[in-house]
Image (tube, coloured by chain):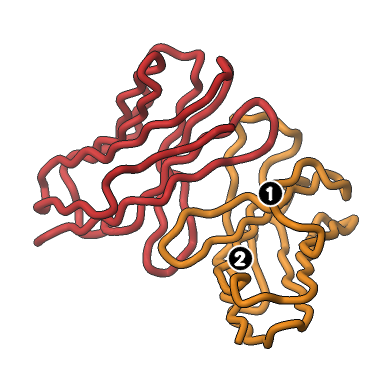
Chain colours: A orange, B red
Amino acid sequence: ETGVTQSPTHLIKTRGQQVTLRCSSQSGHNTVSWYQQALGQGPQFIFQYYREEENGRGNFPPRFSGLQFPNYSSELNVNALELDDSALYLCASSQPGLAPQSEQFFGPGTRLTVL
Amino acid sequence: AQTVTQSQPEMSVQEAETVTLSCTYDTSESDYYLFWYKQPPSRQMILVIRQEAYKQQNATENRFSVNFQKAAKSFSLKISDSQLGDAAMYFCAYRRSGNQFYFGTGTSLTVIP
């Protein structure tokens, strides 16, 4: 069983640029959530995808967008990057269904630095 | 709005001793779930323990147990017989009947040999 993987590991961008982060969910998981973790903070929920549809969104502007593919992998896109977007971006997948008790399995994260 | 508060930014414990990490949360809901996650320096977040709010009994997973006080909205994590591998950031998280997780700011645990 393959765990959650994310790419790239690290990324450096400049203000105003656009970035795409990728996540492969754990085998059998159809729900993917994205989180932003600023330095010294806890993860902040960005949004979640369930069966290719957005299923809940946190307090993030529309320039944060996502996709989920038929194989349940997912992308997080951020347009018009700002310095405050510098953070660790975590992807988490969970077991079939939206049972609230289902455990989320996290990937290792992508460290994004915006200069 | 749901908020999760971890008032201890840093904690330390002697190896083999017991330590308790605190967490409080704010919610108006009656049905929800609480979690403790561990994030070692390698960054990958790992589930330590979970608690369903409707269950009176405190969850236990080997050396890890919780003290869940629903009326007080408190959810502390007790680590018994602390080991060097327990050193990490610990995050308390709340999940309501929907799909959003809310995390606290974390507690950095140091285990002293």
Which residue was labeled with disc 2?
Answer: A89
Q: Are marks 2 and 1 in contact (CB under 8 Å)?
A: no
Camera-nearest label, 2 or 1: 1
**Residue toward you, B57 or B1:** B1
> The disc labelled 1 sits on which kind of residue?
Asn
Residue occupying image coordinates x 80% and y 64%? A63
The reply to whether residue A52 is in sight is yes
Residue occupying image coordinates x 48% and y 40%? B93
Residue occupying image coordinates x 71% and y 65%? A23
- Numbered badge on residue B3: none
Q: Secondary structure at mark 2?
A: strand
Which residue was labeled with disc 1?
Answer: A59
Give the left or right position of residue A4, taking residue B40 as reference.
right
> Residue A107 appears at what percent x and percent y?
59, 61
The CA distance from mark 2 to mark 1 is 15 Å
Give the left or right position of residue A53, taking residue B30 as reference.
right
> Residue B92 appears at what percent x and percent y?
42, 41
Callout 2: chain: A
The quadrant of the rendering that contains the N terminus of chain A is bottom right
Q: Residue B6, located in which quarter of the rendered image?
A: top left
Q: Residue B71, located in which quarter of the rendered image?
A: top left
Compared with A21, B101 (above or below) is: above
> Residue A62 appears at what percent x and percent y?
81, 58
